[in-house]
Amino acid sequence: MLVTQKEIVNPLSGERIIISGQPETAGGTLAWGLVLAPGGRVPSSHAHPEQEECFTVLAGQVRFRIGWRRLLAGPGQTVRIPPGTVHHFANGGPLPARVAVTTVPALGMADLLETAAAMAREQQAAGRPLPRLLDLALFMREFEREVRAPYLPRRLVRLVTRLVSGLAGRRGPAARYGRLRAASGRPGL
């Protein structure tokens, strides 16, 4: 059996993601490795509406914020994030942190991770402090089962992303996002 490995690097967050083998889809499990550089962190607080994430720290330290609770996890410790729970994580020490992560159900999480990294590479290359609003709206619409913005009413976010992404589709930026998605390894919308 041939095992393939895909490495995804996000230059803005200091994340290096390693997906081994063929990622499961739909109701399966996505198992992936995460290496967080010193100072590395997930780009923003977020929640996964339908997915549970489990982080097992293999080396280093990882700071988590789960809801309003904060904790520091070290080697051998596992942190479980239930579906719909707002969370954030960052390297909590001076050395790279290595983490084994599972996401259940997998849904499109592997594609989300690739697309987010492709957007970050483009943002870095353009020297922009933030991603393009239209790209972000298209991203949030495409991955609405996998991720949502915290603390904002879900229906409002969904309405705004659908309106903005609809405008993007009519004005042409959706084609640019499609090219960005193709660069991440998967065709766009």
Image (cartoon, rainbow, N blue to C red):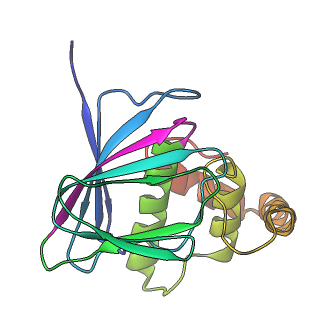
Q: How many marks?
A: 0
Establish if 1 lies above or below 95: above
Q: Can I make out residue 42 in this image?
A: no
Establish if 124 lies above or below 98: below
Q: Position of residue 12 (x, y in %)?
A: 36, 75
User: Which residue does the image show at 70% across and 65% down from the upper left?
Assistant: 137
Query: Most extreme residue toward the top, as rendered?
Result: 1
Q: Position of residue 30 (x, y in %)?
A: 42, 36
User: Which residue does the image show at 57% across and 27% down from the upper left?
Assistant: 27
Relative to 31, 122 lies left or right: right
Establish if 147 lies above or below 122: above
Quarter of the image where one finds residue 67:
bottom right
Quarter of the image where one finds residue 9:
bottom left
Q: Position of residue 152 (x, y in %)?
A: 76, 74
User: Which residue does the image show at 22% across and 24% down from the upper left?
Assistant: 3
Q: Can I make out residue 15 in this image?
A: yes
User: Which residue does the image show at 42% across and 86% down from the upper left?
Assistant: 127
Relative to 120, 187 lies left or right: right
- Which quarter of the rendering shows the N terminus? top left
Residue 101 colored in magenta in the image: yes
Relative to 62, 114 lies left or right: right
- Which quarter of the rendering shows the C terminus? top right
Q: Main secondary structure of the magenta part?
A: strand
Q: Position of residue 50 (x, y in %)?
A: 65, 44
Relative to 133, 78 lies left or right: left
Residue 22 colored in magenta in the image: no
In front of the other: 129 or 28: 28
Residue interval drawn in magenta? 96-108
